[in-house]
Amino acid sequence: MIDPVGIITEFYRPGTRIYDIFMVHAEAVAGRAVATAEKVPHLAPDIPFIRQAAWLHDIGIYLTHAPGLDCHGGAPYLCHGVLGRRLMEEHGYPDHGLVCERHIGVGIDATEIRRRHLPLPVRDMRPVSIEEQIVCYADKFYSKTRGNQPRSVADIIKGLAVYGQDKVQIFRQWVDRFEKDVPGTL
């Protein structure tokens, strides 16, 4: 069992603005992710892993340039997932690292990275496991700039539509899977 807060405090100093932003967001995402996982026991999600990965999914943001979040690194914000993966792999947690890398949007594939000339390694970065999908799904509800105030499904869909209807479709499938496809509810 890993200690996500212990890992976070290796990179974020308690009492700083970025630490506070990070922790509020991570706690909200972790809460939503665990609640989502508990609704779908028939999918056999690993809830302890989901809790840890949700706390750590944004670990790489401090390495990016996002002054509004008090992040003053050199990389584009879009890179925080791959940077987080590297940090988690260096700590010996490659599965947590995959969640970091694969939670951006609803996932990004190699074709999109090439087509849009994104500053990312050209590889598939879409959530694969149920755990990765649940953390990615939960993350869509919380913006770091809104604290722990969740966004509506309609707002999330509106935001994803800018990137294509395929992104909207993935998210709608998750809504159906995690909110509607619960045994015993019709």
Image (cartoon, rainbow, N blue to C red):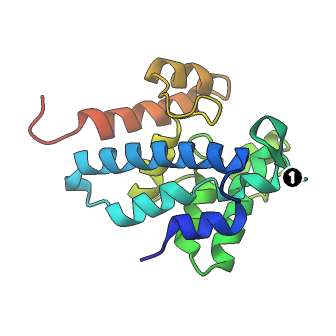
Q: Residue at x 23, y 45 (%)?
A: 39
Q: Position of residue 93 (x, y in %)?
A: 56, 76
Q: Does residue 92 sit above or below 86 in this rendering?
A: below
Q: Position of residue 63 (x, y in %)?
A: 81, 56
Towards the viewer: 53 or 137:
53
10 Å crowding of disc 1: few (<14), some (14-19), many (20+)? some
Q: Residue at x 31, y 40 (%)?
A: 178
Q: Does residue 169 sit above or below 50 in this rendering?
A: above
Towards the viewer: 91 or 120:
91
- Based on the displayed image, in which of its 4 quarters is residue 158 positioned? top right
Towards the viewer: 136 or 90:
90
Horizontal side of residue 148 vs 176, given as left or right:
right
- Based on the displayed image, in which of its 4 quarters is residue 122 positioned? bottom right
Identify the secondary structure beneath mark 1: loop
Horizontal side of residue 184 vs 26, given as left or right:
left
Q: Residue at x 26, y 61 (%)?
A: 44
Q: Does residue 112 sit above or below 120 in this rendering?
A: above
According to the picture, the residue beneath numbered tag 1 turns out to be: 75
| Quadrant location of the C terminus in the rendered image | top left
Q: Farthest residue in the front direction?
A: 15
Q: Position of residue 92 (x, y in %)?
A: 60, 81
Q: Farthest residue in the left direction?
A: 184
Horizontal side of residue 76 vs 170, given as left or right:
right
| Quadrant location of the N terminus in the rendered image | bottom left
Q: Is residue 46 visible?
A: no
Q: Amino acid at mark 1?
A: Ala
Picture mark count: 1
Q: Residue at x 25, y 32 (%)?
A: 180
